[in-house]
Image (tube, helix red, strand yellow):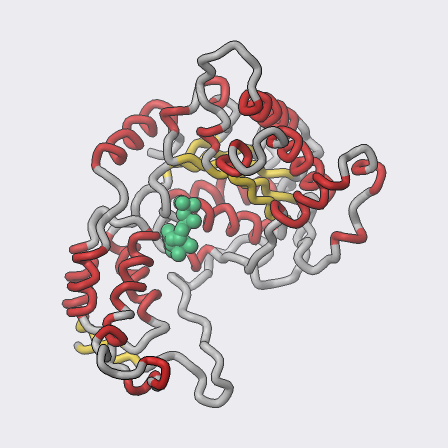
């Protein structure tokens, strides 16, 4: 069957329609991310104006410049993310729902647990959906999302990194429930070679202290999610603070299929089922981000084909549909970004320290 999908734009309003989700979100937990319903102990902060809620007593001793920086650069509400916005990763999603979200959202039912897994480590190749999962967890909990880049702490903000981290946790606690999301955590929780205290080791000390406090505090409505694509570079001290360590792998064939369909759905395309299946087969080893780049390159094919035309005057309906040939050309340019050697490291690390089967 040939799929000749027309551009999904409303002819009346001229607005793009929302692209279809990866799956029907029957499994949504708690407050559906697009709903504003408060849920149990985790009332949605999305609807409230936090600027008036910050308890002054808790922040009065903090440096106002740091609080402003955190508010402007770390607090990152963004659009809500639903489970159905994430292709594949079924095992990770199930583990998060069962072991992290349900116990937090339904403490009345999950009474037997001694400690909630409030500190998570997502490890695996770059561009596989770790950030999407973090945002989704925040959306499901109706929580403030604080996004901290490990590399920004040690480069852009070096010298102030530990203070920024401290201020981020302070603001997150004031705005709880909160999800603190720290990417490239291996840069912070590395094995120390020198005894000398350095700005980076101060950041590490601060992070370990915050992890310790949050994990042991029964009152904090804080989930800390750290991510790394180099788990083998983390030392044991850092590793053991994470109550759940989940491998977030490359997308399998079914997830890549969903991604191609999803990414093409916003464009006019003409690919048979067989051609889509062939594209999926040829993208073995691609990350989710690689798939996005591939589709972005392929959908430029019809524009490249209009070389002699004045592109500024072109109308969308003058462009031919995206075809398999466009994917064929794009596959010459876009290669998988993750090597087999890296993948082997994740498998080994998962066997030793991971919590996935
Ligand atoms: P990571 O945090 O693992 O480096 P991200 O979550 O930031 O990766 O993903 C980068 C981009 O790649 C996303 O914005 C999305 O476009 C795409 N992507 C990656 N994985 C997935 C996935 N499982 N489902 C849908 N899109 C994905």
Q: Position of residue 214 (x, y in %)?
A: 64, 30
Question: Quarter-wise, where is residue 217 in the image?
Answer: top right
Farthest-out residue, top: 195
Residue 342 visible, this orientation: yes
Q: Position of residue 183 (x, y in %)?
A: 48, 39
Q: Nearer the viewer, residue 252 or 10?
A: 10
Which residue is painted at 41% across and 70% down in the image? 19
Farthest-out residue, bottom: 12
The N terminus - image quarter: bottom left
User: In this picture, is 14 found above or below 343?
Assistant: below
Q: How many marks?
A: 0
Which residue is painted at 22% across and 50% down in the image? 335
Q: Position of residue 299 (x, y in %)?
A: 28, 69
Q: Nearer the viewer, residue 236 or 43?
A: 236
User: In this picture, is 186 found above or below 173?
Assistant: above
Which residue is painted at 48% across and 42% down in the image? 98
Residue 105 visible, this orientation: no
- Horizontal side of 133 relative to 180 (left or right) equals left
Which residue is painted at 16% across and 55% down in the image? 282
- Horizontal side of 342 relative to 114 (left or right) equals left
Q: Nearer the viewer, residue 249 or 42?
A: 249
The C terminus - image quarter: top left
Q: Nearer the viewer, residue 119 or 55?
A: 55
Question: Quarter-wise, where is residue 36 in the image?
Answer: bottom right
User: In this picture, is 190 found above or below 43?
Assistant: above
- Horizontal side of 161 relative to 345 (left or right) equals right
């Amino acid at each position: 069957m040939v799929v000749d999908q027309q551009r999904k734009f409303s002819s009346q309003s001229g607005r793009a329609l929302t692209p279809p989700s990866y799956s029907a979100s029957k499994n949504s937990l708690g407050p559906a991310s697009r709903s504003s319903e408060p849920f149990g102990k985790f009332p949605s902060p999305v609807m409230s104006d936090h600027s008036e809620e910050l308890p002054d007593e808790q922040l009065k001793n903090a440096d106002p410049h740091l609080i402003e920086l955190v508010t402007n650069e770390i607090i990152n509400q963004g659009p809500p993310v639903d489970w159905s916005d994430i292709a594949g990763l079924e095992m990770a999603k199930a583990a998060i729902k069962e072991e992290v979200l349900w116990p937090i959202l339904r403490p009345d039912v999950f009474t037997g647990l001694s400690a909630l897994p409030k500190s998570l480590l997502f490890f695996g190749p770059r561009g596989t959906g770790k950030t999407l999962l973090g945002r989704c967890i925040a959306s499901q909990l109706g929580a403030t999302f604080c996004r901290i880049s490990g590399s920004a702490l040690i480069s852009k903000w070096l010298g102030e990194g530990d203070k920024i981290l401290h201020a981020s946790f302070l603001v997150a606690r004031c705005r709880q429930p909160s999800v603190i999301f720290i990417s490239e955590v291996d840069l912070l929780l590395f094995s120390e070679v020198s005894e000398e205290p350095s700005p980076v080791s101060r950041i590490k000390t601060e992070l370990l202290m915050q992890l310790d406090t949050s994990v042991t505090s029964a009152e904090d409505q804080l989930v800390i999610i750290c991510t790394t694509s180099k788990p083998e570079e983390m030392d044991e001290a850092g590793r053991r603070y994470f109550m759940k360590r989940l491998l977030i792998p490359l997308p399998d064939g079914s997830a890549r299929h969903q991604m191609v369909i999803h990414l093409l759905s916003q464009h006019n395309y003409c690919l048979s089922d067989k051609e889509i299946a062939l594209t999926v087969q040829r993208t073995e080893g691609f990350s989710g981000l690689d798939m996005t780049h591939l589709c972005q390159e392929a959908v430029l094919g019809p524009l490249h084909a209009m070389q002699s035309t004045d592109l500024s005057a072109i109308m969308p309906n003058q462009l031919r549909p995206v075809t398999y040939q466009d994917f064929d050309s794009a596959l010459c340019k876009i290669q998988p970004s993750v090597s087999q050697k890296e993948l082997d490291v994740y498998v080994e690390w998962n066997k030793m320290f991971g919590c996935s089967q």
